[in-house]
Amino acid sequence: MSGLLKSSIGRKFAMAISAFFLMFFLLQHFVINLTSIFPDHGATFNELSHFMGTNPLIQYVMQPVLIFGVVFHFVMGLVLEAKNWSAQKVKYAQNNGAANSTWMSRNMIWTGAAILAFMILHFIDFWFPEINTKFIQGDWSGLHNGEYRYFHELQEKFHHPARVGAYVGAFAFLAMHLLHGFNSAFQSMGANNKYTKGLKTFGKLYAILIPVGFMIIALVHYFNHSH
């Protein structure tokens, strides 16, 4: 593994693998959150959340893998950015970076930083309280006053317009990050064939629809509460 990460191609390949893993997780996370706006008063969302929150495979295997994937992706992003910045200083006289790249590709580190800030907020809102309830208090029932607590806790987080605005803004940054990141990951994996055009189209749809979907979920909960 260390040998792979010593080369530029190896680092980009590893970055692409971690990106695909996180995009798969993001899709799964979106599907579960989408059920929170089903017209069943949160029943489906509660059932799925309880399954995900109490399944040993997910809690003791997939959750640590996910955390590693997130940390690895951000650290590798910083490493690649540092390498690119160093190379650009040398090649500055020969190349105009702004002319040869898109705004999104030049600012991946900043959109990534915005996403990281959002993830910290998201962890404070949901993950840390969940860890406290299950692993410190030892309560794995998922119940509060005899009913599953997940849907109610989700609704409570979207009462305040500032928090909803932070979520919506973060998903806008996520869309920008994905618009470049999806295609970049495929290129790093060597995808350059008759399917390239289709992959780019799929990447754009994913990069726009998933973040917009998350925005809609947050706004639906906010407006449902305000009325």
Image (cartoon, rainbow, N blue to C red):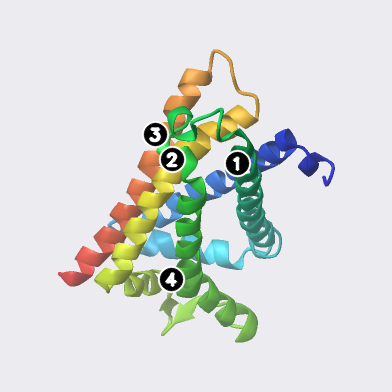
Mark 4 Cα within 10 Å, few/some/many (few <14, many 20+)?
Answer: many
Q: Which residue is mark 2?
A: 104
Along the line of sight, the residue nearer the viewer: 116 or 28? 116
Q: Of the residues shown, which amino acid type is indicated by label 4? A: Tyr
Q: Are marks 3 and 2 in contact (CB under 8 Å)?
A: no
Q: Of the residues shown, which amino acid type is indicated by label 1? A: Lys
Q: Is 74 on the left-hand or right-hand side of 211?
A: right
Mark 1 Cα within 10 Å, few/some/many (few <14, many 20+)?
Answer: few
Q: Please identify the residue farthest to the top as the structure is shown.
A: 194
Nearer the camera: disc 2 or disc 4: 2
Q: Picture coordinates of residue 13 (x, y %)?
A: 69, 36
Q: Is 7 on the left-hand or right-hand side of 153?
A: right
Q: Which residue is mark 3?
A: 205
Q: Residue at x 51, y 39 (%)?
A: 181
Question: Element type at marker 1?
Answer: helix
Quadrant of residue 134 in the image? bottom right
Q: CA distance from mark 2 to mark 4?
A: 36 Å
Query: Which label belongs to residue 89?
Result: 1
Q: Which residue is mark 4?
A: 150
